[in-house]
Image (tube, helix red, strand yellow):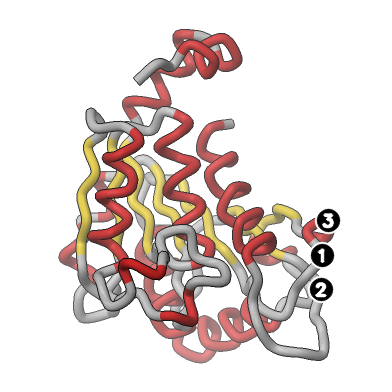
Amino acid sequence: MDWTRTIQLLGQERFEQLQQQRVILFGVGGVGGWCAEALVRSGVQHLTIVDFDTINASNLNRQIVATDANIGQSKVEEMRQRLLSINPQADIVAINQRYTAETSANFQLSTFDYIIDAIDSVEDKVQLIYEATQTDAVLLSSMGAGRKTDTEQIRVSEFWKVTGCPLARALRNKMKKEGLLPHKKFQCVWSPELSADSGTIAPIVGVFGMKLAGLVVS
């Protein structure tokens, strides 16, 4: 793969550092799929992607991995093939499994430099944040991307400074109730926007994912 333009921007030393980072990404749906693609196109060589779901027709409006031809297929396997079609030399590990309290030990979080959370489930998200913040890895987390249409309102803040996000509020309540408070601070991508109608669209999840990837690159 020709990295000339990336190296011109980042510099050789910074680019080589990026290639050495070990990244694990949980969730390759709306937000996670765009994040994974941006990471690999930016030079990340060692990426582990985790998801237990399959592609369905309702994913076509927003998920980069979803096409009419691969409905019913494993998201994580389809994403792996897509990433390798971009950079065949990349080290892409696909794990078709759900992250839960019961499976958390399977992922060896302490072996990664970056842990990216693009999980939808509140219960699983709380567990991942709790476990990830006990490691030396940098944790980056996506808050709720649903019910939003304005990309200009998307921002990055420390978790406890996120306001007006129902998912962040639900996470905090569960963390306090169950005694699973994070062990250190971490950055989140979020938006205070909340429309009256439900749903999710590609520009929003795309920007969420790109911002997560950008935090790794920067």
| Residue at the spot 28% in from the left edge and 37% down from the top edge | 46
Q: Are marks 2 and 1 in contact (CB under 8 Å)?
A: yes
As measured in the structure, the alpha-carbon distance from the residue carrying label 2 to the one carrying label 1 is 7 Å
Q: Amino acid at mark 3?
A: Glu
Q: Position of residue 159 (x, y in %)?
A: 64, 63
Left or right: 20 in relation to 15: left
The numbered mark, 2 or 3, whose residue comes first in the sequence reads 3
3D distance between C-alphas at marks 2 and 3: 10 Å
Q: Position of residue 74 (x, y in %)?
A: 25, 70
Of all residues, the one furthest to the left in this rendering is 106
Callout 1 amino acid:
Asp
Residue 47 to residue 192: above or below: above
The residue tagged with tag 3: helix, strand or loop? helix
Is the Cβ of the residue at disc 1 closer than 8 Å to that at disc 3?
Answer: yes
Indicate the quadrant where residue 178 lies.
Answer: bottom left
The image's mark for residue 193 is 2
Question: What residue is shown with label 3?
Answer: 152
Going 50% across and 71% down the picture, which residue do you hit? 60
* Corner quadrant of residue 168: bottom right
> Is 192 positioned to the left or the right of 66 in the image?
right
Give the number of the disc on residue 150: 1
